[in-house]
Image (tube, grey):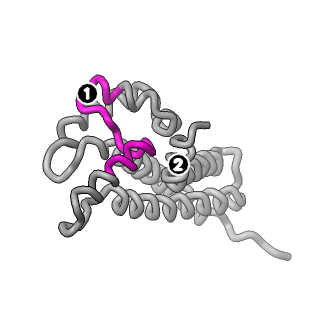
Amino acid sequence: MPPETRKEKAIFQKAMRAFELNVKSIQAFRSFLSDECAPQSPEYYMARNFLRDAEMLYTEALSEAKKLLGPLPGYVSSQVADSKKAMLEAMSVVAKSADMASLKAELERDEFIASMFRPQEIALYVRANFENQRKGKRKLPNIKARMVIEKLGVKLAQARELRERAQQKHQAAPPSSSS
C-alpha cells in the first residue's frame, strides 16, 4: 500500500468507521423490524449502540474536516498556506481536478470514495454539486470531504428513522415476566 493511501486512511478513519457502523445499524434495525424478530430481541439494543457510535464518530469526523479544510487565520503566511495545500493534495484529502469530467474520473479512481459511493452516485453528485462547490466560501478541492460528510448525514438520517420505528415496536412489546 503506497504511503499516501495509508495517510489518507488515517485521516478518513473516523468517517469510514462511522459509515461502517451506520451500515451495521441499518442492517440490525431492519432485521429487528422484520416479522421474524421478537420485540424483546437484543437486536434492538445492538442496532441502537451501532447508531450511537456512528453518530459520535460522525461528529468527530465533521469537526476534524472543518479543522483540516477550514480557512487559515489571517496572520498565517502564504508559505504556510501553500505547505498546507501541498500536504492535503499529497495525502489525497482534497481533489486536484478543476473541470467536471476530470473531477468525476478522479473521484471514481479514489479508493476511499469508491468504498462509499457507486460510480453512478459519484457522477450524480459531481453533476449536482460542481458549480455550487465553487461558489462563495466553498472550494472545489474540498468536494471530496463534503461528499463524504453529506453521505454520512443521509445514512444517519435513514438509521434514525429506522430507530424510531424500531423503538415503537420495542415499546409495544408486553413486559417480559421474570418469574
Q: Residue at x 61, y 49 (%)?
A: 24
Residue at the left extreme, as displayed: 136
- What is the number of the mark on residue 29? none
Residue 33 shows up from this direction: no
The image quarter in which residue 71 lies: bottom left
Q: Amino acid at mark 2?
A: Lys
Residue at the bottom extreme, as displayed: 179
Q: Secondary structure at mark 1?
A: helix
The label nearer to you, 2 versus 1, is: 2
Q: Amino acid at mark 1?
A: Met
Q: Residue at x 81, y 75 (%)?
A: 178
Q: Secondary structure at mark 2?
A: helix
Query: Which of marks 1 and 2 precedes in the sequence?
Result: 2
Residue 169 place in picture, x, y as percent = 58, 58
Give the residue at mark 2.
Answer: 7
Looking at the rendered image, the quarter that the C terminus falls into is: bottom right
Q: Please state which of residues 93 and 119 is positioned toward the viewer in this rendering.
A: 93
Residue at the right extreme, as displayed: 179
- Relative to 41, is 15 on the left or the right? left
Give the residue at mark 1.
Answer: 100
> Few, some or many C-alpha atoms within 10 Å of disc 1 (few <14, some 14-19, many ≥20)?
some
| Depicted 52 relative to depicted 97: above or below | below
Residue 119 place in picture, x, y as percent = 43, 26
- Relative to 37, is 9 on the left or the right? left
Residue 78 place in picture, x, y as percent = 22, 57
Q: Residue at x 71, y 58 (%)?
A: 41
Q: Residue at x 23, y 28 (%)?
A: 99
Residue 118 shows up from this direction: yes
Bounds of the magenta span? 84-104
